[in-house]
Amino acid sequence: MKFIDKMTKLCIADSQSNPIEGELPSIKEIKDSYNSMILSASGWRKIFAQSNDPEDSTEGITKADCFLSAMIALSLATYLGYKEDCPLTGKTVLLGIDARPTGPAILDVMTRTLLCCGIHVKSLFIAAAPQLMAYSAVEEETIDAFIYISASHNPVGYNGIKFGRNGGVFPGVISQKLADTFTSLVEDSQQRAKIKKLLATQKIEEIEEVYNAIKDENLKSKEIYRSFILQTGAMGKDENKFLSSLKNKLKETKIGIIGELNGSARGASIDKDFLPEIGCKTQFLNATPRKIVHAIVPEGENLEMCRKALEAAYAKDKSFILGYVPDNDGDRGNLVYIKESDGKAYILGAQTVFALVVLAVLSKTRMLNPDAHIAIAVNGPTSNRIDDIASMLNITVARSEVGEANVVELAQKLRNDGNLVKILGEGSNGGNITYPAKVRDPMNTIMSLIDLLTNPEIFETYRKYSSYKNPTLTIENILNSLPNYITTDAFSEKAQMRVKSDQRTLKNNFEKLFQVYFEKHKDVLMSMYDIAAYKEYQMEGTITREGMGEEMRTPPYKGGLKIAFLNDRNMQTDFIWMRGSGTEPIFRILVDSRGLDHDRHDALLLIERQLIEEADNRS
């Protein structure tokens, strides 16, 4: 029996069709499939499209990938206590997918595998990642773990896995346990036959019960998600009073929003109902899940369609001042805005979006808690403009290695130490995490900006601490109040390199070359850029260590390396940063430079790139 999702009209699965029936894939086929997968705490990803083309939008996956999907589900089942031929009882796993074409095939295999392990399965089918995670947080007593099938911002032919519970992805220690189990399953030559035997025990009525319940589970998750967003915006106050106040403010301050959803899972979420409910005018484009019309990563030119639509809407109705574009799982979204001085729409970079929301949330937090110890957790390559904003408001900044799980864990450590932490995130990757959420969410981004634009007291608090003079509350003026920095766009070609060396060797070589370079050119660096000294930092998990050399790093030496440049007044002016991507086969680099001198930024980026190339060639 074929099951069709009631909302999206897309096929969920055929309950009568066992996806692993027939001839077994070879051990080599499974290992080749496994070897193409990147495993990290941020998620497991590979190309699942049968053609191995990253841009292939077909739905089928190979037989090897079917077995690989079963092994992934078995890894979680094992973590929850499953043992071979000993089904679990009393465990529930929540499943969901983004809008990628290969999602249903992977979901079907995992659903069957978990059921055959004795695990109760709740499935949402297509749902935005923050929606699924909010459900898992609110229902933490009944949901033991979740699997979200997504490759986030990667091209459409990719897919991947995020594991977690209680509203967020698992921390690194648990992720590594799952990865080790997965690897051992792949290495077991008998595992193919075991999986085929396990899934032969599938009871059709069990899987049909799961698929019949998708509509109700999805509706329930939307209700929970809506309430969760309001709780987040209310910052500990009564959510109904917050909603009522927000509606009244939006009657006075009209705000129109363009949502260009690019066929993402947000098209199946609450956006089209929630924003009008609170009082926003809206227009939505490409809001049908899987109707992907441009590259998925919400950066640069991929926001151009939204920019043009916003500009056209503003010409007819001056309330339309914001637009957003999410990635495919809908856990991040970058913005376009209207510059009222010229009536044109402009694209905001990820670092600027993050700074804008940080300004809003930290200012409100300080306004409500004038004497509290407040902190913010960010990743290593987040711009120092966050440090400047936080410093104005007497707020502490702590940094972790790249990775959502790392930032969330660091924020909790700060709370355990007595700090109030209301916002955290990865400025380099875009999107904020607003407590109690443990995942990025464009709805929280938009809610923070609506709160700021309709509540002059928040901006007045920031003006009081920052001495910014212009009292007019517009996005343009708020942006003008931000500290000036130029930061490499994390998804631009300039921010990506291909290296052949392992990170341990590369970093050791780089440090030696950098010391020689700095000593040789220190007079030029001082005269041209007022750079007098430097400090080096190593970021691993939630830990940041100051110091140079391999003894400051730990195996497998994959953390972030950052060199901060200081002027002759011992003030940090710039930094260069590097780290191999955990989800893509690239080496990421970035420069953050105080001021508006693009030549300065470009010169430092060129120095970094050349030293990395030389370090790589010495391996």
Image: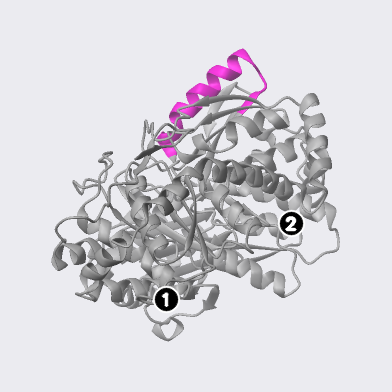
Residue at point 51% right, 38% down?
266
Q: Does the magenta stretch include residue 312?
A: yes
Q: Does the magenta stretch include residue 111?
A: no
Q: Main secondary structure of the magenta part?
A: helix
**Circle 2 or circle 1, nearest the eye:** 1
The residue type indicated by label 2 comes to Met
Question: What percent of the width, then of the height, locates residue 521?
Answer: 39, 67
Residue 156 picture quarter: top left
13 vs 439: above or below: above
Residue at point 39% right, 59% down?
589
Question: What percent of the width, then of the height, locates residue 117?
Answer: 40, 67
Which residue occupies the foreground of this view, 54 or 395?
Answer: 54
Residue at point 44% right, 63% down?
577
Q: Check disc 1 and report the residue beneath it.
A: 177
Residue at point 48% right, 72% down?
80
Q: Give the range drawn in magenta.
A: 300-321
In the picture, which quadrant includes the N terminus?
A: top left
> Quick one: SS at disc 1?
helix
Q: Check disc 2 and report the residue beneath it.
A: 392
Few, some or many residues within 10 Å of mark 1 (<14, 14–19, 20+): some
Q: Kindly report the distance in space between the C-alpha atoms of the residues bearing marks 2 and 1.
A: 42 Å
Of all residues, the one furthest to the bottom in this rendering is 551
Q: Residue 72 carries which label?
A: none
Sequence-earlier tag: 2 or 1: 1
The answer to whether residue 136 of the structure is visible from this angle is yes
337 vs 191: above or below: above
In the picture, which quadrant includes the C terminus?
A: bottom left
Question: What percent of the width, then of the height, locates residue 54?
Answer: 26, 46
The residue type indicated by label 1 comes to Lys
- Horizontal side of 83 relative to 361 (left or right) equals left
Few, some or many residues within 10 Å of mark 2 (<14, 14–19, 20+): some
